[in-house]
Image: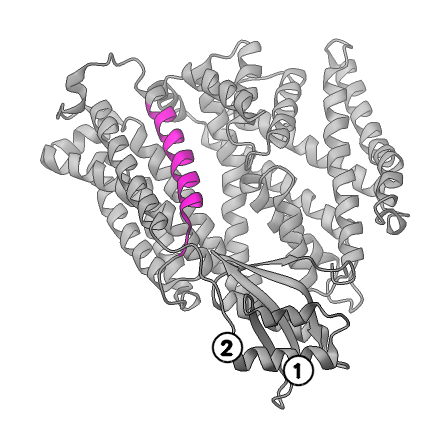
Amino acid sequence: MPILVIALIWHELHALNIHRVRVILRTVDFRLFVVGVGVAFAAVAIMGLYDAIAFPRGAAGRLRFGGRWLLGFVIFGWTNFLSMGPLGGPAMRLVAYRRYGLSATEITRGLTAHYFGTSGGLVAWLIACWIPIGSGVAALGVRIGVALALSIVTPWILSVALVPILRLHRYGADLEGLPLMRLGAVSFLDWGLTLISFMTLMRSVGVVLEPFGAARTVFTGQFAGLASMIPGGLGSADAVWLKGLAMLGISHDTGGAAIVIFRTGFYLIPWALSLIVIYTVIAKQSDRFRLWQRRLVAGAVMLNSVLLLLSAATPAVRDRLHAVARIVPLGAIEASHAMATVTAVIMLFLVRGLFRGYRSAYIFTMVMLGASAIAHPLKGGDYEEAFASIVLMTLLFGVRKAFVRKGRVPIGWELTLGVALGALAMFLVVGFTAFERIPYSQDLWVRVAEHAEASRFLRASILFGAISLAAIARQAMRPVSLRVTPTELEIQRAEAFARRHAESADPLLVGGADKGVWFCESQSGQTIGMVLFQRLGDKLIVFKDPVIASGADTREVINGFLAFAESIDVDVIFSMVSTEWM
């Protein structure tokens, strides 16, 4: 599947004339664009009703209808653009709803109803737009009626088919009485507004589509994006949209410009708003939510790095480049292009450090953003990229207190290699597509001229590869195994505690001195819990069940151990744990 997706994306991008796409984008009708964005926000607002309807208030009644709607609105705005297929939304909801006191059963029930509703609406609209009943006002009315009916019926059909299967895995007993009809109605409105936004944003660049062709194009692309498991369907959905627009007689360049407008109006702008809402409103509610500020900013830095790389791989706006060349020397343009590439690549490798809260990653990122803000206007008048870097610097400065962890950022050579290969592949594909009409010659590598942008791209690709190799080598030379060995006193203490409180002899394995021991102490200084673990890279492997003293608070022990793992920047993996603990 990934190979087929990449091949389709390459085939469609290969036919694009990037310069022509930029020219078309300058002709956008701003009023229609604003209307399309307004419809997009209406669609995302409707999406918030999924959460308001599917999830309960919780046992404590802390999360009312409006609160659930706001959570859904923000999460949809975020995950529509960045989540990996259908996985990102549930992950964020698990964290959010657990914070508001919902039980695992309530969250599972809400997520299941949520999925039945959203998928039922997409299936309904797909069927309605592909049934062969011709065109005209009457056919349009029939298709809308079919979409409405199927949007309400399909979630019920999915529940009838899937709940018995879920019962086999002990989940189905809690899935009776789901509000499927209301979710189906929400799904009908959600996907319907998506179609209207698609048509309006397409029209803003002169692409006028009939409802039937527009519906087939947008919904088939949405389905392909979800199935590809690529974040936001980036590339996969776009390739299907390009193909669908071509079948409707729209040129590749015009279709490419229209898709950029749709991505901006329906995905990027709502994502930016959700980022601001999470950053300024939700994060004020607790210290833990403030930690999400740095994670959201880390995601924004990653996105900014990708956009800066795309800018470095594509031609500058000719008029802007000419204006810059009249003011600054050619050498400054060359150096600025190289600097813009270097800063974007380095920031990609700093994202994990920002996510984990390392002070060094924060400082380096601030320096890179400052250099980027200076380099982009000089490399070709890229003022938008400079403005984005300044905005990110401001956001990072606002959460500077969240970056307090000291030490070097442990990324791991495997993750570094994956990031490097993925980003470099994207950089090369976009660059070769943008400059494919320039014939290759050996002197391209050393050509220095005002409009030698293909040469600057080739040199930037070498620079990209060199930085990536240096980052991979740096991580590969760091020790992978950081084994923990208990002291004799810790072994004796652990054996004594296990003999008093353990339900099996497994904790006595600590006597082999091949596992670390973590003790949880109460406020009075008494030991109330014990965990055997071993460190492997950035993972902390827990062996067997934790040992809890009689009458002690299990949650206190587990939360304490997770906090310990967080303090040393490792992820916890529970190994050979009994079903009771799972």
Name the residue nearer the viewer: 514 or 460.
514
Disc 1 secondary structure class: helix
Left or right side of 495 for 450 = left
Q: Is residue 275 above or below residue 3?
A: below
Other-residue count near label 1 (Cα within 10 Å), few / some / many at <14 / 14–19 / ≥20: few
Q: Residue at x 78, y 10 (%)?
A: 133
Name the residue nearer the viewer: 257 or 431.
431
Give the percent coordinates (x, y) of residue 284: 54, 67
Label 1 sits on what residue type? Ala
- Among the 4 quarters of the image, the one containing residue 61: bottom right
Q: Which residue sits furthest bottom?
A: 524
Pointer 2: what residue?
487
Residue 347 appears in view: yes
Contact check, label 2 and label 1, Cβ < 8 Å: no
Pointer 1: what residue?
496
Other-residue count near label 2 (Cα within 10 Å), few / some / many at <14 / 14–19 / ≥20: few
Q: Residue at x 9, y 35 (%)?
A: 329
Extent of the magenta region:
410-431
Image quadrant where one finds the C terminus: bottom right
In the rendered image, residue 34 lying in the magenta stretch gets the answer no
Give the percent coordinates (x, y) of residue 89: 64, 46
How many numbered badges does the structure rendering display? 2
Give the percent coordinates (x, y) of residue 254: 45, 17
In the rendered image, residue 425 lying in the magenta stretch gets the answer yes
- Among the 4 quarters of the image, the one containing residue 101: bottom right
Mark linked to residue 547: none
Q: Main secondary structure of the magenta part?
A: helix
Label 2 sits on what residue type? Thr
